[in-house]
């Protein structure tokens, strides 16, 4: 089984607590979330429409899409509120030396 590839996304300082950052790396468009110093990464695109989750409203561990107001759990990718029905992809996130990485397969 091949080892996972780590992709360096950003520094921890680039994402203030309670905010998100859109990152385009290695052919992926991602949203990096800082929830009280804990970092999570999802696909940036809402699964329902053209909304950008990094531009959505964040409350606790839920992000509300700025397009149709669907909601996702940032930690699990699960749908929290309609009209979304398909979960958003989440990535294994590692923070090391003040940098945020994902493990891509």
Image (cartoon, rainbow, N blue to C red):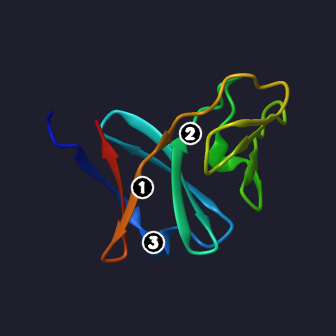
6 relative to 90 in the view: left or right: left
Binning the other alpha carbons within 10 Å of mark 2 as few (below 14), some (14 to 19) or many (20 upward) gives many
Q: Check the picture and name the quadrant holding the C terminus.
A: top left
Residue in view at x 62 percent, y 40 percent:
77
Q: CA distance from mark 1 to mark 2?
A: 15 Å
The residue positioned farthest toward the left in the image shown: 2
The mark nearer the N terminus, 3 or 1, is 3
**Disc 3 marks which residue?**
12
Q: Which picture quadrant has residue 3?
A: top left
Q: CA distance from mark 3 to mark 1?
A: 12 Å
Q: Check the picture and name the quadrant holding the N terminus.
A: top left
Tell me the element at label 2: loop
Q: Is residue 10 above or below residue 44?
A: below
Residue 61, numbered circle: none
Binning the other alpha carbons within 10 Å of mark 3 as few (below 14), some (14 to 19) or many (20 upward) gives many
**Disc 1 marks which residue?**
93
54 relative to 67 in the view: left or right: left
Q: CA distance from mark 2 to mark 3?
A: 18 Å
**Disc 2 marks which residue?**
44
Q: Position of residue 81 (x, y in %)?
A: 84, 35
Residue in view at x 65 percent, y 31 percent:
46
Q: Position of residue 89 (x, y in %)?
A: 53, 34
Tell me the element at label 1: strand
Tell me the element at label 3: helix
Q: Position of residue 49 (x, y in %)?
A: 70, 23
The mark nearer the N terminus, 2 or 3, is 3
The mark nearer the N terminus, 1 or 2, is 2
Which one is in front in this view, the residue at disc 1 or the one at disc 2?
Answer: 1
Which one is in front in this view, the residue at disc 3 or the one at disc 1?
Answer: 1
């Amino acid at each position: 089984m091949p080892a996972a590839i780590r992709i360096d996304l950003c520094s921890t300082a680039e994402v203030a607590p309670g905010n998100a950052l859109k990152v385009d790396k290695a052919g992926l468009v991602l949203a990096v979330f800082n929830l009280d110093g804990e970092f999570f990464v999802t696909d940036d695109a809402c699964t329902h429409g053209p909304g950008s989750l990094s531009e959505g409203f964040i409350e606790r561990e839920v992000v509300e899409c700025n397009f149709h107001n669907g909601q996702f759990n940032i930690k699990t990718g699960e749908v929290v509120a309609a009209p979304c029905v398909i979960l958003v992809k989440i990535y294994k996130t590692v923070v090391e030396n003040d940098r945020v990485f994902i493990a891509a397969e």
